[in-house]
Amino acid sequence: MAAAGVSLIEDSSAWGVIGWFEAARHLRPFLRRLRTLAVRLRANPPDVLVPIDFPGFNLALLKRVRGCCPAVYYVPPMVSVRRGRRAARVAALGARLLAVFPFEADAYRRAGANVTFVGHPAIDHIRAVEPADAVRRGLSLTADAPVLGLLPGSRRQELALLLPPMLEAARRVLTAQPAVRLLLSCASPIFRAEIEAAVAASGLPITVVDGGRDVMAASTVVLLASGTATVEAMLLGVPMVVVYRASWSTWWLANLIKAVPWAALPNILAREVVVPELLQRRAAADAMSAAALDVLTHPEARERMRRRLLDLAEALGPPGASRRAAAEVLAAMGAVTLKAQMAIK
């Protein structure tokens, strides 16, 4: 956003905290930021406020500035996969909601929210990824080399909990299949030094790649943290093993409120197990390596998974999600006519 010319009041790239109790330990700085932004917005209301994702912070902000300006919430919190009345509470804040999953739009609509399904922006991002053969050439990989991709997540907590068992799983895969090449995604430059240090300490022949999409495109199978990366892998039709760990307190609370038995978004879309999930205690090196090897060594099953993922991707809407979201924001400002909106779409 800064590169695009946006004036940053605060850089939130290092704010991410996973878990209720973990967030509570950072409550004081979050409350300070919240007060600062709320005062600023009320003193000088923008033509439109566009909160994006980050529900723990953005829902509190919307509550404090409700009525001072139109609000269009892009990627509101997921509600269809959890128990309780969160959809109704979000709807009561009065923002226009732009959902990126059709089942989320349906859940919010049932709760009385002003919501529209705009599609998932990852569709356009993935369309910009080079073909797999080109990505492999750029990474000095042959077209037929078996490749295991590691995507441990984009937050420091995820790296701490998932990178060590992923590296050990990669070691076991390499022992069983010495021809396998290893790629590891670095989601942000702020993590580059610690990722490279962990790789060096492991002694494994791993290529560290900036970002995850090239890793996905080049991989035969990926071990990846549950989240948006699973949507991107699904859009590319990349067979995957989804893993996740959280603190035990967060895991306990999550199980109290969840309404579906799956964590991986492809499985939630399909309402059945399409890709393996290894969560919490099961997200250990032995289970990761066994699941990855199972996909690597069974090409017919791998191809069935690939086709199923591509079929599921059709539910995320056509390309142009970001343009449709932009049209909704402009409409909330009263800045464009219906004809102009359609041109943007």
Image (cartoon, helix red, strand yellow):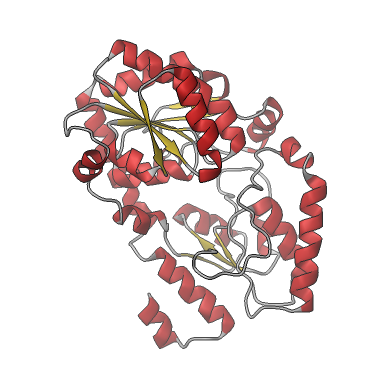
Image position of 19 with respect to 39: above or below: above
Task: Name which residue lies at 49% across and 19% down.
Answer: 201
Left or right relative to 183: residue 23: right
Of residues 161 and 233, which is closer to you in this image?
A: 161
Quarter occupied by residue 148: top left
Does residue 10 lie above or below 257 as drawn?
below
Image location of residue 246, percent across then percent down: 62, 30
Residue 327 in the image: x percent, y percent? 46, 76
Q: Residue at x 31, y 33 (%)?
A: 239
Name the side, left or right, on which 272 lies relative to 66. left
**Residue at (51% x, 25% y) in the render:** 198
Nearest the viewer among 13 and 244 is: 13
x, y (%) of residue 243? 48, 29
- The structure residue drawn at horizontal position 50% and vertical position 41%, both measured from the top left corner, is 227
- Quarter residue 172 falls in: top left
Asked if residue 89 can be seen in this view, the reply is no
